[in-house]
Amino acid sequence: MRITQEADYALRIVSVLAKSEKPIGAPLLAEKVKVPARFAVKILRKLGQSGIVHSARGINGGYNLSLPSEELSLRRVIEAIDGTIAIRHCLCEEHICTNSPDKERCRFHKVFAALNGMITEKLDKLTIGQMTDGAIPVNELINIIK
């Protein structure tokens, strides 16, 4: 599994919004995270559809987080962009296991499903609020996911 560049940009965009008390327009967000403006708008649209951000029009308009950054997990942001996290294709409902017609009898499937569960659990534990809080040492963030 690899987090896409688009999801990485989404994490950056959400981090910028978490630090702001007022709405930020898409062009300024794009500039701050160093991403083309059209790509930023595409990402913001997906984040909006997932209920992570909302937008307001007008002179004081722009984008805000829809919920407190302390309640917004890394997993939710990543899945808003990349879809359900699956380290192997057979973990997705629409795919069949190429090792066995019965996923529950496949040893590889069971092991990768357990690993996938660990990854998603760890991504659920970390929030954007924690990641953007410069007072929290990186070692403490790592301890949260141990």
Image: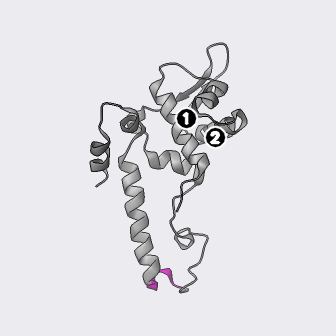
Q: Nearer the viewer, residue 146 or 98?
A: 146
Q: Amino acid at mark 2?
A: Ile
When the figure is inspected, residue 108 is found, relative to residue 59, above or below; the finding is: below
Tell me: 45 left or right of 121: right
Q: Are marks 2 and 1 in contact (CB under 8 Å)?
A: yes
Locate the C terminus by quadrant: bottom left
Task: Give the image quarter of residue 89.
Answer: bottom right
Q: Amino acid at mark 1?
A: Ile
Give the labeled residue for mark 1: 13
Residue 76: in sight, yes or no? Answer: yes
Residue underneath mark 2: 43
**In front here: 134 or 119?**
134
Q: Is the residue 25 above or below the residue 103 in the image?
A: above
Queried whether the magenta region covers residue 66, the answer comes back as no
| Main secondary structure along the magenta-highlighted residues | helix
Residue 23: image location, x then y, percent: 56, 21
Q: Which quarter of the figure has residue 70?
A: top left
Where does residue 39 sit, x and y in percent of width and height? 69, 39
Disc 1: CA contacts within 10 A as few (<14), some (14-19) or many (>=20): many
Q: Which segment did they paint magenta? A: 102-106
Residue 74, placed above or below residue 104: above
Does the image show residue 66? no
